[in-house]
Image (cartoon, rainbow, N blue to C red):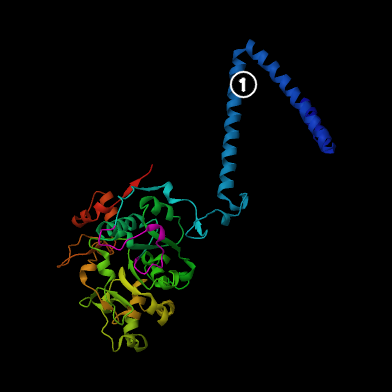
Amino acid sequence: MVQKKIKKRKARCALALQSLPLQNQQHTLEGEEKRREEKRREGEAKTKKNPRKRGKRKRSNMSWAMRFSGFFSAAMLMIILSPSLQSFHPAEAIRSSPHLDGYIRQPDPQNRFSFRKASPFRNAEQCRPNNRTLTTVCDPSLVHVALTLDLEYLRGSIAAVHSILQHSLCPENIFFHFLVSDTNLDSLVQSTFPQLNFKVYYFDPNIVRNLISTSVRQALEQPLNYARNYLADLLETCVNRVIYLDSDLVVVDDISKLWSTSLGSRTIGAPEYCHANFSKYFTAAFWSDHRFAGTFEGRRPCYFNTGVMVMDLVRWRREGYTKRIERWMEVQKSARIYELGSLPPFLLVFAGHVAPIEHRWNQHGLGGDNVKGSCRDLHAGPVSLLHWSGSGKPWVRLDSKRPCPLDALWAPFDLYGYTH
């Protein structure tokens, strides 16, 4: 009977509160708070007389606090994980960048990665006088180098830049063009190389997402692998020539020598390997269909690695090579004419029309095959560039304490450190 009376009394109080104006409700609640405070004081006075009850009250308070804390933590987690509960639209969580016009998303990778500052670099006396404050991307005396930047290969890219600066007679005359897709890396580059002439370009993955065939191997179909196809569109029109480099290499010679390579009437230059089995880069369906295989008639196609190329951007733009590559990517979606991702379209467009460059400028394959990443030896002859193409990367093998002998040639250019 007592319990029923209490329940009825509470129900009447609730109805009364609902019928009161807001101000009266507030006064009622304040009065209720005062009564609770008086009861609490009376309870404390009683517990002083009875320690056992006081212990029970403490445990009860702790239990209530833990339940509230758990509820509060869960609620906060829901708000963080659910965009619909956030006080801002997810698209607004974009870090502004002077290079990328606000396309770059948080979090800043510097929260996880840290690189030592590179030693200062200066031009030799015989170099053109360089006033760094006046250097612009359109300066005709600059050497232009393009690389991609992403978190997976960031350590390799930084080492590549470091190696170029270390071996250049005129490092202040080099301008770097970095292609990125979704991370804020320009401030990291600036802090590692404070004197560096560079610019960061946003490459929208959606440009190629619908062009990448689902049949190509997953590891090679990342959109940023195709960014080199769009250098002529991304870079300023005043940039007439650029050296494109992969992120898993180091340069051990003056890159101005590669820059001065004559391309003649060709659009790109690269070391060619005509002894390689060229047919393996395309499927049996490709070679059995004259519409496709006839592409190479009248040409002497040779394999070349697209990780090191000198590109004439003026001729590229004029001849529309980006569209030509995209057309072959469209064919691949319906006909499956090759297995790999970004290399075969380049071979289809350029093989047999490449200005040959000395093999010393791409000692490739040091990462081993694409399955085991086994150790490899250098090819015979002089070396100007070491390229760890293949699945084995020197920074991964060094960290795992299972390096290959040639990984020791990469290590001196590593500026990486991990922030805990």
Q: Which amino acid does label 1 sit on?
A: Arg
Q: In which quarter of the view is residue 36 placed?
A: top right
Name the spot of residue 124 as percent of width and height, x first: 26, 58
Which is more toward the observer, 378 or 118?
A: 118
Viewed as shown, does residue 277 lie left or right of 333? left
Q: In which quarter of the view is residue 57 placed?
A: top right
Magenta span contains residue 133: yes
Q: Is residue 153 visible?
A: yes
Residue at 35%, 58% in the rendered image = 153
At mark 1, the secondary structure is: helix
Name the spot of residue 170 as percent of width and height, x first: 28, 61
Which is more toward the observer, 234 or 394?
A: 234
Secondary structure of the magenta portion, mostly? loop
Mark 1: give few (<14), some (14-19) or many (20+) Cα within 10 Å: some
Magenta span contains residue 32: no
Q: Name the residue under label 1.
A: 57
Q: Can residue 185 be seen in this view?
A: no
Q: Is residue 250 above or below residue 330?
A: above
Q: Quadrant of the C terminus?
A: top left
Specify start and end residues of the magenta stretch as a single range: 123-144
Which is more toward the observer, 273 or 62?
A: 273
Residue at 28%, 81% in the rendered image = 264
Residue at 45%, 62% in the rendered image = 181
Name the spot of residue 7 as percent of width and height, x first: 77, 31
Q: Is residue 318 above or below residue 243?
A: below
